[in-house]
Image (cartoon, grey):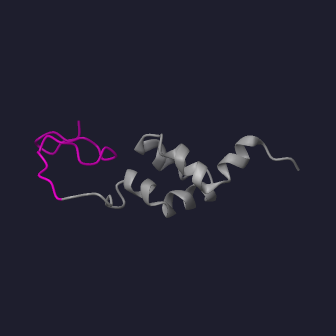
Amino acid sequence: MATTAAATVFGITELLEQILLYTDPRTLLLAQRVNKFFRATTQSRNELQTRLYLRQSSEATLKYISLDEELNILLPKRDRYGLID
């Protein structure tokens, strides 16, 4: 059975990681539902985990964060009363 070029590329962990790093966090989160290989890649690669806010960045330092700064873009936005926009 012949494999396609896409199947070959997506079957190499390092190439899949590089492709997934170009997606936004929401798409990256949903990409885990494609198949077991995508999920395993997302769960095992540090950079992908950092993009999903599941792991702290290796170069992260303690910084003051303003209240207006968005911490996690995957969470629903809330107004100052705690209501979802």
Taking the image as shown, residue 70 lies to the left or right of residue 6, namely: left
The number of numbered badges drawn on the structure is 0
In which quadrant will I find the C terminus? Answer: top left
Q: What residue is shown at x 78% (from left), y 42% (from top)? A: 4
Q: What residue is shown at x 22% (from left), y 43% (from top)? A: 70
* Residue closest to the eye, 74 or 55: 55
Taking the image as shown, residue 1 lies to the left or right of residue 43, namely: right
* Residue closest to the eye, 27 or 75: 27
x and y, in percent, of residue 34 in the image: 60, 49
**Secondary structure mainly formed by the magenta segment:** loop
* Residue closest to the eye, 41 or 74: 41
x and y, in percent, of residue 45 in the image: 49, 60
23 is within the stretch colored magenta? no
Taking the image as shown, residue 50 lies to the left or right of residue 12, namely: left
**Residue that protrudes farthest toward the top in the picture:** 85
Quadrant in the picture for residue 38: bottom right
**Residue that protrudes farthest toward the front in the picture:** 59
75 is within the stretch colored magenta? yes
**Residue that protrudes farthest toward the right in the picture:** 1
**Residue that protrudes farthest toward the bottom in the picture:** 44
Q: What residue is shown at x 50% (from left), y 47% (from top)? A: 30
x and y, in percent, of residue 74 in the image: 34, 46
x and y, in percent, of residue 75 in the image: 30, 47
Taking the image as shown, residue 51 lies to the left or right of residue 34, namely: left
In the image, which residues are magenta? 62-85
